[in-house]
Image: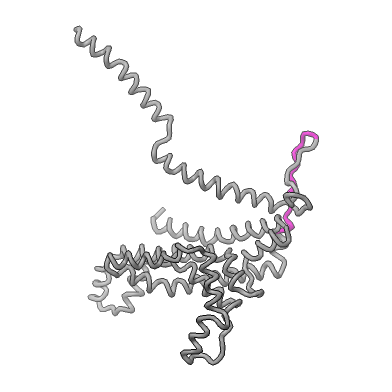
Amino acid sequence: MKTFQTRSAATGPLVALHTALARLRLILPSRRTTAIAVPSAWLVLFLAIPLLLVLKISFSEVALRSPPYTDTTSVRDSVIRIVLSLQHYAYILTDHLYVSTYVSSLKIASISTILSLVIGYPFAYCISRAAPGKRNLLMIGVMLPFWTSFLIRVYAWVGILKDDGLLNRALMAAGFIASPIRLYHTDLGVYIGMVYSYLPFMVMPLCAHLAKMDLNLLEAAYDLGAGPVEAFFRVTIPLSRNGIIAGSLLVFIPSVGEYVIPEILGGSGTLMIGRLMWDEFFNNTDWPMASAVTVAMVVLLLGPIAAFQHYQNRERGV
């Protein structure tokens, strides 16, 4: 009896401590919740809040003060007044220059994405079929340009694409052309810069999907009488479809709002949303119009992102 009482006295505080810890676990967030909360807080702080601020500025009007826009809310006689201006969005939808800029940006981004896919797919296929040691070496080669400043890499193409640049001199020395081809300050130069800069974003997701492909499926296609070309289009392409879509989005989305490449390699006739935003913000000091251009671009890009998400959910049966 004494032993029982001693144990009860000893275990009583332990039971109370265990109960308190159990209740504390119910109150405190789990490790999974914490792991999700940290990146979510980062996105809210550095993406959602700045975007909401840009959205607010887009509904204001330009003003000769600092910052150069009017307030959308005011308090007078204990009454909160909210004044939202839609004139900038109406101007974007009706002005020929702005409409042409959006169309041109979508065209350049789409062509750059297609070229990146055509060039990047064979390269990604070769990497995925290489031996493990060589595969790692090739992947390092793909990521090697990221070790250099993006601005320096784009400026390097100026010396290559100019009339007296490396490319024209090589073509004339080989006898392919008699006079220099105009590549610098043209849309073609922008395409070259876009593909060069964003090609790794296409190659990496393609490599990830192609490396996981079951080669027995290709063997089965060959056994059923399919040739290499037919097996490629009926087996390899469908199995790498998610990689194609992911890589295309990673190239297309930043290409739409690109500023540095068209500013350095493009001409005065190269219309891009990024250049338009820069002009409105810094040259015209029209922050409301620049914010409206930005919001319109974000809304425009939500379309392909939503389509990709819908496709992913349908594939998972959600």
Q: Residue furthest right?
A: 77
Task: Tell me the colour scheme of the image.
Answer: one colour
The quadrant of the image that shows the N terminus is: top left
Residue visible at 66% across and 74% down in the picture: 268
- 89 drawn magenta: no
Percent x, y for residue 67? 72, 50
* Residues rendered magenta in the picture: 77-88
Q: Is residue 136 left or right of residue 299?
A: left
The x and y percentages for residue 78 are: 77, 34
Left or right, 100 with reference to 80: left
Residue drawn at 46 percent across, 71 percent down: 116
Q: Position of residue 33 (x, y in %)?
A: 42, 40
Residue sitting at x 71%, y 70%? 96
In the rendered image, the vertical position of residue 61 relative to residue 127, given as above or below: above
Q: Quadrant of residue 75?
A: top right
Q: Nearer the viewer, residue 137 or 245?
A: 137
Residue ranking furthest to the top: 2
Q: Residue at x 36, y 62 (%)?
A: 208
Residue 268 to residue 59: above or below: below
- Between 132 and 217, the one lying in front of the other is 132
